[in-house]
Image (cartoon, rainbow, N blue to C red):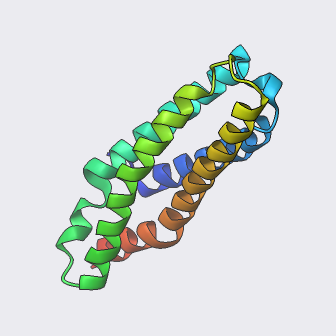
Amino acid sequence: MYTLEELEQQNSDIANLCQVLLVLVREPELRGNPYVCDLVSRFYDKVWMHLMFEDKSLYTDLLDSPEPSVVDRVTAFHDSARVLKKRFGSHIKQWCHIDADEEDHAAFKQEMTEVIGAIMERVAAENETMIPLVRAQQHH
């Protein structure tokens, strides 16, 4: 199991990668570039493992909280991971397909920008809400 500090570092790494990918997705000629594809693959692995870890262990104890508002937040956070995993996985797999025309790239750019934005929002929510909830529970 990761420590909260390791989780925060993962979140920082993911947020930094999101910022880079938001720049790269704008350039249609970089779609299919082997170096960009490698970066996207590493990003995918990092986000996927992070989602799997938090899904399996980190916030599970919070579901036993006597406070309904905590349980509600944890449940909503957990449920949002499933939606994000599905959306994220399907878009990332398209990144390295270079046979797209300009119109396809515009749609892809919009979709990827939305997915990366959703990941960034999740990282922020985790840092601002979920991690403090875990810390508070650990102090009880």
Quarter of the figure with residue 40: top right
For residue 50, above or below residue 61: above
Relative horizontal placement of residue 76, taking residue 126 as reference (left or right):
left
Name the residue located 48 percent from the left edge and 34 percent from the top edge.
90
Quarter of the figure with residue 25: top right
Relative horizontal placement of residue 127, taking residue 35 as reference (left or right):
left
Position in image of residue 62 (x %, y %)? 26, 69
User: Total label count?
Assistant: 0
Position in image of residue 139 (x %, y %)? 32, 76
Q: In this view of the protein, which residue sits in the foreground, 114 or 125? A: 114
Q: Split into 4 quadrants, where in the image is the N terminus?
A: top left
Position in image of residue 87 (x %, y %)? 47, 44
For residue 32, above or below residue 21: above
- Would residue 80 be visible to someone looking at this image? yes
For residue 24, above or below residue 63: above
Relative horizontal placement of residue 120, taking residue 28 as reference (left or right):
left
Q: In this view of the protein, which residue sits in the foreground, 54 or 93? A: 93
Name the residue located 30 percent from the left edge and 78 percent from the top edge.
70
For residue 93, above or below residue 86: above
Q: Split into 4 quadrants, where in the image is the C terminus?
A: bottom left
Name the residue located 66 percent from the left edge and 37 percent from the top edge.
108
Position in image of residue 100 (x %, y %)? 69, 23
Quarter of the figure with residue 135: bottom left
- Would residue 12 be visible to someone looking at this image? no
